[in-house]
Image: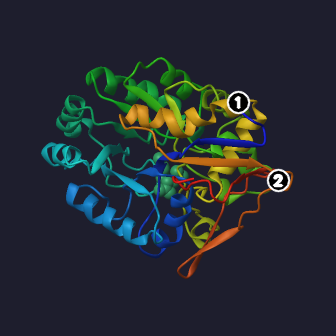
Amino acid sequence: MPDPLRLTIRRPDDWHLHLRDGAMLRAVAPHSAAHFARAIVMPNLVPPVATGAQAAAYRARILDALPEGARFAPLMTLYLTEETDPDDVAAAAASGLVHAVKLYPAGATTNSASGVRDFDKVRPTLERMAQIGLPLCVHGEVTDPDIDIFDREAVFIDRVLDPLRRATPGLRVVMEHVTTREGVAYARQGGPDLAATITVHHLVINRNHILAGGIRPHYYCLPVAKRETHRLALREAATSGERMFFLGTDSAPHPDSAKESACGCAGCFTAPNALQILAQVFEDEGALDRLEAFVSLNGPAFYRLAPNDGRITLERRDEPARFPARIRAGDEEVTVFDPGFPVHWHVAAQADDERT
Ligand SMILES: NC(=O)N[C@@H](CC(=O)O)C(=O)O
Ligand SMILES: [Zn+2]
Ligand SMILES: [Zn+2]
């Protein structure tokens, strides 16, 4: 077991992040760059980041939004549409710009209207990705309105994901933000071409946190948090150290005005406190020795990248960490995820300096 008061691990990465654009990008990017060395940047802007040229331009805007001296590498993704050109995808991957393609079933989540309706139309792109080993990141929920929202992930696995993987041998898939024990079980038995990201908030909340004792819009995200048995399965998976599970925060900022609304947006903003909350969760599970695998090792191994050279030191103090309740983004405010329990883990000030 590591020293219970200080834990030094390789710098972590975030394998599922929403950075948005404009004033929001400038407000949130520094929070991710403060703790994470790299992030898979989700492409669900309006219009979506669908071509290599759009990804290159978006990457430049992200770099421009970072503070002086930040060491943070945005790993770009392309939004899979029915018009996606396999040659464009292959060229963007070969140049090192693009690290994955994102599949949104049309209508499944925020800004998914340009996503896929007819899977036959994306078959040539999927085949090419299988050939070149480029991962497909999947938002795994069916959009069928007859399926209960709490069942949409499990039904997606049976109806869409499993047939898709069988039809495309060699396709490397990341099941994004798994929220169910069915998702965990499927990821476990999928072999080396399958992995799953897990968010911080799905390790912390179940559906009662959203709905019991008043509706809590800042806990609403997609896929929606499920019942407690699923949260426990996710905690067991994340803390297991198994190679197929790694962190994707899905930090998804929306202005408070859009969340605290009669029809509120889905997404939890966790970038400022994701790492500290995770350390607390892993401590509570007696698994601090496996935190590094989850946040710093398993992700790069799946994406065929080296782990980061730098180290970050987390420190457990009696006095809980203090996080801002909300941050400002241009004229708007964005509420920071509140885990609802004291977080005793702090990022030690000098920790993410590679030279120390
Ligand atoms: N997770 C969410 O609730 N929202 C994400 C979209 C997504 O990852 O599905 C967003 O972009 O706001
Ligand atoms: Zn999603
Ligand atoms: Zn997301």
Residue at 57% x, 54% y is 352
Q: Is residue 107 visible?
A: yes
Helix, strand or loop at label 2? It is loop
Residue at 68% x, 55% y is 348
**Mark 2 belongs to which amino acid?**
Gly
Q: Nearer the viewer, residue 153 or 198?
A: 198
Give the percent coordinates (x, y) of residue 181: 60, 26
Q: Nearer the viewer, residue 54 or 225?
A: 54
Give the percent coordinates (x, y) of residue 186: 49, 22
Helix, strand or loop at label 1? It is loop
The residue that label 2 is drawn on is 213
**Mark 1 belongs to which amino acid?**
Ala
Other-residue count near label 2 (Cα within 10 Å), few / some / many at <14 / 14–19 / ≥20? few
The residue that label 1 is drawn on is 287
Q: Is residue 85 above or below residue 173?
A: below
Q: Nearer the viewer, residue 209 or 303?
A: 303
Q: Quadrant of the N terminus?
A: top right
Q: Is residue 116 above or below residue 183?
A: below
Q: Nearer the viewer, residue 276 or 235?
A: 276
Q: Is residue 311 above or below residue 22?
A: above
Residue lying furthest right: 318
